[in-house]
């Protein structure tokens, strides 16, 4: 018979804490960027059609700015998306992440 190798107790890495749920503006920005890249459009081209600066569109796509409904309509239109398309995609992504994320809770924006 061969030698028996005894293994010690298994060590299991602790589970990582759940990620906080993404902010609406972060998911909107990702969706707009995905749509723009899928169309092969440059940031400057989409911004020009939407009537906003490329810098502002970049901030929106990175989830750094909370765009108004007028800006969302303009950028969505420049990407041939309706506001309903955008909203359905964003709410679907938030719904999918809800089971694996925790609420962010209140944020102090100003003191």
Image (cartoon, rainbow, N blue to C red):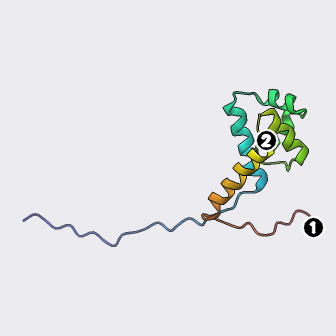
Residue depicted at x 36% and y 69%: 10
Q: Residues within 10 Å of mark 2 (few under 14, many from 20)?
A: some
Distance CA(mark 2)–CA(mark 1): 37 Å
Q: Toward which corner of the image does residue 79 lie, by quadrant?
A: top right
Q: Residues within 10 Å of mark 1 (few under 14, many from 20)?
A: few
Point out residue 8 in the picture as x, y percentages from the top left corner. Answer: 31, 71
Question: Vertical placement of 100 versus 40: above or below?
Answer: below
Extreme residue in the left direction: 1
Question: Vertical placement of 91 versus 5: above or below?
Answer: above
Q: In this rendering, which labeled residue sits more in front, label 2 or label 1? A: 2
- For disc 2, the marked residue is 82
Viewer-nearest residue: 104 or 51: 51
Point out residue 11 in the picture as x, y percentages from the top left corner. Answer: 40, 69
Q: Is residue 34 left or right of residue 45?
A: left
SS label for mark 2: loop
Viewer-nearest residue: 67 or 74: 74
Residue depicted at x 84% and y 44%: 72
Q: Is residue 87 left or right of residue 9?
A: right
Which corner quadrant holds the N terminus?
A: bottom left
Point out residue 6 in the picture as x, y percentages from the top left corner. Answer: 23, 70
Point out residue 80 in the picture as x, y percentages from the top left corner. Answer: 77, 34
Residue depicted at x 27% and y 69%: 7
In the rendered structure, find residue 16 and report the number of the disc placed on it.
none
Viewer-nearest residue: 54 or 77: 77
Q: Earlier in the sequence, mark 2 or mark 1?
A: 2
Residue depicted at x 77% and y 42%: 61
Extreme residue in the right direction: 111
Q: Toward which corner of the image does residue 21 lie, by quadrant?
A: bottom right
- For disc 1, the marked residue is 111
């Amino acid at each position: 018979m061969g030698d028996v190798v005894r293994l010690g107790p298994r060590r299991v890495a602790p589970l990582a804490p759940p990620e906080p749920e993404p902010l609406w503006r972060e998911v909107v920005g990702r969706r707009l960027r995905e749509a723009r890249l899928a169309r092969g459009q440059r940031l400057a081209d989409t911004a020009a059609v939407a009537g906003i600066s490329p810098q502002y569109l970049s901030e929106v796509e990175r989830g750094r700015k909370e765009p108004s409904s007028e800006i969302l309509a303009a950028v969505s239109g420049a990407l041939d998306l309706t506001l309903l398309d955008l909203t359905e995609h964003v709410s679907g992504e938030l719904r999918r992440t809800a089971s694996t994320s925790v609420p962010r809770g209140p944020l102090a924006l100003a003191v």
